[in-house]
Amino acid sequence: MHGRSEPEGIVSPEEVRRIAALIQLEVGDDEAEDLGRHFQKILGYFARLREMDLEGVEPFTPGEPSIALREDVETPWEERGEVLDRAPFREGDFFRVPRMERDEESRREGEGRAGSGEGGHLPPGSCSAD
């Protein structure tokens, strides 16, 4: 297989903007054209893979993880109180942190949630998924 295979169809700027809208991204005209060409190349690679003769080739399955895992054991944290005492905002055994504002629409939709200015509660050492 030495020939170059092009995928069927072309990824138009309109198609790029439609896909971008699905994942809530804004894409300008120049960007949509560049991304369309980039997507077209990616689809070309998949077309080339489809042409390959894989008869008798076993699927690749990764082996055991090479990372040594440890037992998940709760351990006391001696400095916890000291760290909480230094926190600018504390509520019991938690840090009080401001919510992150996402955008204007989130503020309108999320009264009492994102963008409301109300604090959230995170235990020390935790990360928010917001």
Image: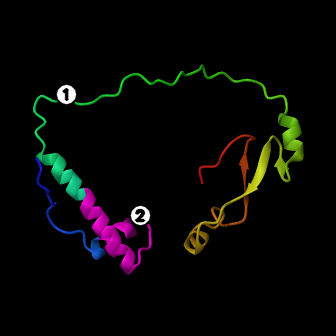
Q: Is residue 21 magenta?
A: yes
The nearer-to-camera label among 1 and 2 is 1
- Badge 1: residue crowd in 10 Å (few <14, some 14–19, many ≥20): few
Dot 2: element: loop
Give 112 or 91, whichever is nearer the viewer: 91
Which circle marks residue 23 in the picture? 2
Taking the image as shown, residue 51 lies to the left or right of residue 125, namely left
Instruction: Tell whether 14 sits left or right of 86.
Output: left
31 or 94: nearer the eye?
31
Question: Which residue is depicted at the point 69% across and 24% down?
Answer: 74
Is 93 located above or below residue 69 in the figure? below
Along the viewing direction, whichever of 58 and 109 lies nearer the viewer: 58
Res. 85 image quadrant: top right
Q: What residue sits 23% from the left and 57% below the top?
A: 43
The residue that mark 1 highlights is 58
Image coordinates of residue 51 in percent, x first then y, are 11, 47
Q: Going by the image, does 10 lie left or right of 110?
A: left
* Residues in magenta, as a range: 16-42
Q: Residues within 10 Å of mark 2 (few under 14, many from 20)?
A: few
Residue 78 percent coordinates (x, y): 84, 28
Whether residue 109 appears in magenta in the rendering, the answer is no
**Residue 33 location in percent, x, y?**
32, 75
Please tell me whether the stretch drawn in magenta is mainly helix, strand or loop. Answer: helix
Residue at image position (83%, 35%) is 80
Q: Earlier in the sequence, mark 1 or mark 2?
A: 2
Q: Amino acid at mark 2?
A: Ile
Could you tell me the amino acid type at mark 1?
Answer: Glu
Q: Residue furthest bottom?
A: 29
**Quadrant location, the C terminus:** bottom right
| Residue farthest along the top direction in this orientation | 71
Picture layout, residue 86 above or below residue 76: below
> Which numbered circle lies on residue 82?
none
